Image (tube, helix red, strand yellow):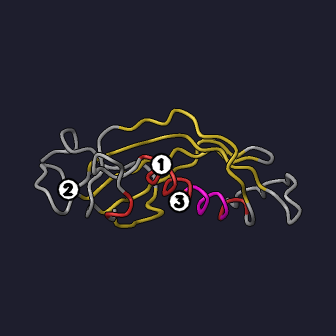
Amino acid sequence: MSNESCPLPEGSLILRTLAMPADTNANGDIFGGWIMSQMDIAGGILAKELAKGRVATIAVDSMKFIRPVKVGDVVCCYGKILHIGTTSIRLHLETWIQPVIREEVCAYLKVTEADFTYVAIDDKGQKRAVPKLDG
């Protein structure tokens, strides 16, 4: 199968977890809010590493849900840097699944994507500068 018919995630793998029955909505699919939460956790990990300290989520833009997630799917969150400002970090996050219980043509399927913005904060919750990247 070629990459054209089975695209691959963009960015680095940040988080992997398993979709469980407790995370379902009334239709039996994994609740979209749970997926968004996993993305925010993943983005927070990357943003904290970049900011070298505490960060807070300040915006989520262009959230797009593409396909449902089922119980048993391995949920994988990928992220890449879009922009690092004076105090903020903007990331593009994608969530892909490895559908281990059902037969699929592709090993990975994109289920959602969005742009998340984080602001670096100090111990008092006030904005602070993001350190410059090395190199």
Q: Nearer the viewer, mark 2 or mark 1?
A: 1
Going by the picture, which residue comes out furthest to the top?
62
Q: 15 or 85: nearer the eye?
A: 15
Residue under the image location 39 percent in, 43 percent down: 112
Please state if 47 lies on the left or on the right of 103 as rendered.
Answer: right
Q: Within 10 Å of the Cα at label 3, are there few (<14), some (14-19), or many (20+) other Cα atoms?
A: many
Percent of width and height locating residue 99: 22, 57
Residue under numbered circle 2: 107
Query: In front: 2, or 60?
Result: 60
Q: Are marks 2 and 1 in contact (CB under 8 Å)?
A: no
**Quadrant housing residue 44:** bottom right
The image position of residue 122, as x and y in percent, is 85, 62
Which residue bears the numbered disc 3?
A: 42
Residue 65 is one of the magenta-drawn residues:
no
**Which residue type carries mark 1?**
Gly
- Graded by Cα atoms within 10 Å as few (under 14), some (14 to 19) or many (20 or more), the crowding at tag 2 reads some
Q: In the image, which is nearer the foreground, mark 3 or mark 1?
A: 1
The structure residue drawn at horizontal position 27% and vertical position 44%, both measured from the top left corner, is: 7
Which residue carries the number 1 mark? 33
Magenta-drawn segment:
43-48
